[in-house]
Image (tube, coloured by chain):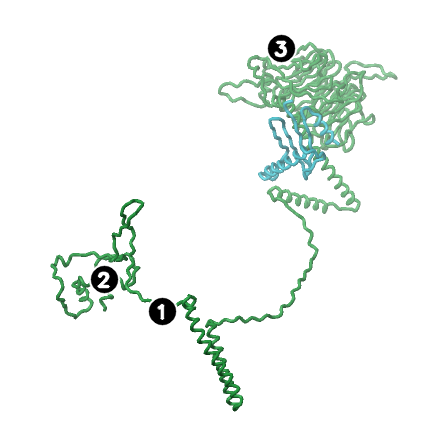
Chain colours: A green, B cyan
Amino acid sequence: MPVVHKTGTVKSKQGSNTQSQKAPAAKPAKAASKKKDEEDGTEMGEGDEWMQGKTLIKPLDQLDLTEAELKEEFTRILTANNPHAPQNIVRYSFKERSYKPISSVDQLAVHFVLEGNLLHQDSDEARRQRAKQGLPEEKATVETAVAEKPETPAAGGEDAGDVEEGGGEERADSVESKAGKKEQKITNQFNFSERASQTLNNPLRERGCQTEPPPRANFSATANQWEIYDVYLEVLQKQEKNKEKAKAVPKKDDDKGKKKMMLVETQSDDITKVAKVAKIIERMVNQNTFDDIAQDFKYFEDASDEYREQEGTLLPLWKFQYDKAKRLSVTALCWNESYKDLFAVGLGSYDFTKQGRGMLVFYSLKNSTFPEYIYPTTSGILCLDIHKHLPYLVAVGFYDGCVAVYNLKEETLQPIYKSTAKSGKHTDPVWQVKWQKDDMDNNHNFFSVSSDGRVVSWTLVKNELVFTDIIKLSLAGAVSEGPEGVQLPIMACGTSFDFHKQIDYLFLVGTEEGKIHKCSKAYSSQFLETYNAHNMAVDAVKWNHFHTKVFISCSSDWTVKIWDHTIKTPMFTFDLNASVGDVAWSPYSSTVFAAVTTDGKVHTFDLSINKYEAICQQPVVAKKKTKLTHIEFNPVYPIIIVGDDRGYVTSLKLSPNLRKKPKEKKGQELPKGPEVEIAKMEKLLSLLREPENSNA
Amino acid sequence: MQFEETLKRIQTHKGVIGTIVVNAEGKTTLDNSTTVQYAGLLHQLTMKARSTVRDIDPQNDLTFLRIRSKKHEIMVAPDKEYLLIVIQNPSE
């Protein structure tokens, strides 16, 4: 019935929900068929749509409903519940002593039961049956077999054909029996038999050979920018060396010599490099030990100078001493122009009776415990000078009249040049040496002055010192009778000299008689001028660094005098109450100078502040008996070094008051440079000159 | 010769507690355990410091290294083959 098919889909129209479709299709179909009976009208309407052309047949027992009733919608819900199943089964619960409804009721509705007659083959019943069946079957086969046997002998007597037939029957029977047996066996229709065959396996043999492993070495390195740079540098150096070798014509001997040189160089490189490292460490250790002194040197400025109007102080810094130089006096001091922390100390003795050995020692401010260079000498040193441009050349004058030149770069402790009796050495102690500018042949040369009255110029020509007498200091008017009636001029003893800063040929010589002679390199016998300076030997004569006309002199007659070289009398005279050993101008101001006396004091003067008195008078040495012998200003730093007769060198820092520069006027820029200094000095001098002129 | 003299002077200097000379591989002559420890550690530190300085400018090189601690100061000066270490107590 086509409508039955439809019922499956009609449900949706009626709004019914199928909750589950557990039941087989027959059930809903049955349920739907019931509904169908009730409402055929609509169905027929549906049917109408489906089957056009069929007329509407109203059954007799159909309900008559009104339109409204017809349109009333009934909701039918399909559930899997059994409508016949009771919904309110109750059971008595003994626990609660009341009747309780059972929550779940068995909803199974059985519609049809048909008992089958199949038995499982392994069940008891099946076995029993089989047993019953099996006996009659076996009997049947045995019977047939027995039947065959009598048949065959009987058949034996018959024709061969019969036998064959019998045989065939037998075979057929046997086949049947076999088949029967086989049937009993129940074979799998998918009969799978495995067929495998094995070939002969060749015996396996292992063969190996081993070689010696290549030598291995572990290598690790880093490739930084600087390592690459180093390698490039090496390659460059090698290339340059090769170029040099290519240029020079090598002989076999030279090659050998070069090889030796190379070896020596490498060895010395090692030693020098390690020595350098040790030096650095030593300086560091010293810096730590003397840390406060180093800090003072660099940064300390005496604040109390603001309260002291004009006076200043000297702050002691490092003290330099060398064990082996304890009994010697400091006879010369000189700062190195190129290395501002390096200075040379000449050690010897001023005492005529105690002449022995001497020493040339170099100290650096960075290491106050041990000298940088040490040169022992046979005779006491009295003076030294370091070349301005070649900081490794040092000229030295000895007590025995020799002069020598040392080269600091050389490893040896001997001077590279030394004057001997043949080469014109002085016959008396050499009191002062000074380097000059290179002469026209570009040879280095220096001057020396000595008590034998000669001012000699020494020139370094190749390997020799060539001397030239520049001037002979003769006492004016004094003539002595020599042997054979020849009149010999008595020589004055030169004790100090100084060359003019700008005018090359002009120089001053101080003598033991207390006179200062102004000389020129050009004139060998005549003085340009003579000043009656002092009553005793002139210990030092120094030109002013800035003002070209001014020089200063000091003497053992306790005085320090400042001169203008155009005027015969001194501009300033200072009495220091003790024999003055040395005097020095400051490199930073034209009016500041310092003097040392044998009573252990350093006197510092600034003429622009106080024209009559020292602005600082300070004893510098611990023991009162020590005499100060020399003083030098450092060209750059505000420190001075002072040598004494016990072999010590003390360094002192100048307080700000001692380093005053002219005050700035408001609004005006401070003019700097030597002109200021010159002007300052000039002003002072002019003040002095005017009253003189007026007096004159 | 000069090196040995300088080294002697350093050792006898005021406040110096000890000096160690380390070669390029990091071995010392005295194999005291502390010495070996110092040598190894400072060797590495110096290499690192030198590497830093030279990485910034290959033409530059490390001159020395100071490590100041509460108790004392360690100063290291490197060289191509050697390393010189000095331990000083600066406050003495």
Give residue A488's position: percent from left, percent from top.
82, 17
Residue, disc 3: A612
Determine the image quadrant of residue A30: bottom left
Residue A504 showing in the rendered view: no
**Label 3 neighbour load within 10 Å: few <14, some 14-19, many 20+:** few
Q: Nearer the viewer, mark 2 or mark 1?
A: 1
Q: CA distance from mark 2 to mark 1?
A: 34 Å
At 74% from the left and 37% from the top, the residue drawn is A268
Of residue A108 and residue A384, the one placed in the foreground of this image is A108
Determine the image quadrant of residue A234: top right
Of residue A550 and residue A252, the one placed in the foreground of this image is A252
- The local secondary structure at tag 1 comes to loop
Q: Is residue A417 above or below residue A190?
A: above
Of residue A323 and residue A100, the one placed in the foreground of this image is A100
Give residue A502's position: percent from left, percent from top.
65, 24
Residue, disc 1: A117
State the quadrant of the C terminus of chain A: top right
Of residue A22 and residue B53, the one placed in the foreground of this image is A22
Q: Which mark is residue A32?
A: 2
